[in-house]
């Protein structure tokens, strides 16, 4: 099922929308502030791409720079989560807390993201 991501022009946060058909009428409304001022943005993770391939596909240019990447809180700590998953190791609670805290907007100083 296609996933469309829109960035809100009012609060600058990203909302994801699922739709059964590209032809289906989609009137995006910000899920954070209910603004209708939404701009379509590339949906990369919905297609199962890795962080590396995304960065290769979008070399440091404007909106798709790594800096912008981490403005989406869902991407923070993603590498860490994937590493633990890949090795089948359970994530220590301290790491979990750090990632969760980062996603709330308080970036830890020593977390390797
Ligand atoms: Zn908004």
Image (tube, rainbow, N blue to C red):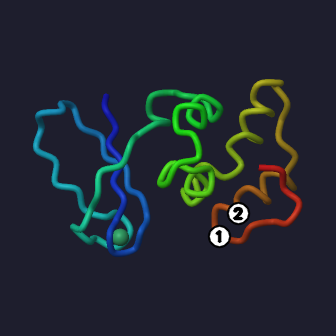
Q: Is residue 12 left or right of residue 106?
A: left
Q: Is residue 61 left or right of residue 15?
A: right
Residue 102 - label? 2
Q: Do tag 2 and tag 1 residues touch (Cβ < 8 Å)?
A: yes
Camera-nearest residue between 94 and 72: 72
Q: Give the image quarter of residue 73.
A: bottom right
Quarter in which the N terminus is drawn: top left
Q: Is residue 24 above or below residue 65?
A: above
Percent coordinates x, y for residue 17 in the rendering = 31, 46
Q: Residues within 10 Å of mark 1 (few under 14, many from 20)?
A: few
Looking at the image, residue 75 lies above or below residue 1? below
Tell me if residue 76 comes above or below residue 86 in the rendering: below
Residue 9 in the image: state x and y as whole percent.
32, 69
Give the residue at the far top of this rendering: 87
Q: Which residue is mark 1?
A: 105
Q: Residue at x 42, y 58 (%)?
A: 14
Residue occupying the point 72% across, 40% down? 79
Residue 6, numbered circle: none
Callout 2 crowding tier (Cα within 10 Å): few <14, some 14–19, many ≥20: some
Q: Is residue 50 left or right of residue 11?
A: right
Q: Nearer the viewer, residue 62 or 8?
A: 62
Ligand 1 within 8 Å, label 2 CB: no
Please tell me which residue is depicted at 18% across the width and 30% down the height of the picture.
Answer: 21
Q: Quadrant of ligand 1?
A: bottom left
């Amino acid at each position: 099922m296609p996933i469309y991501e829109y960035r809100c022009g009012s609060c600058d946060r990203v909302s994801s929308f699922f739709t059964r058909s590209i032809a289906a009428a989609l009137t995006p409304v910000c899920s954070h502030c209910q603004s209708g001022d939404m701009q379509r943005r590339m949906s990369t993770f919905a297609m199962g791409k890795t962080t590396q391939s995304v960065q290769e596909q979008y070399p440091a240019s404007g909106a798709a720079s790594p800096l912008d990447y981490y403005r989406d809180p869902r991407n923070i700590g993603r590498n860490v989560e994937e590493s633990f998953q890949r090795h089948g190791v359970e994530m220590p609670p301290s790491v979990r807390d750090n990632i969760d805290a980062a996603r709330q907007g308080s970036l830890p100083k020593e977390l390797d993201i």
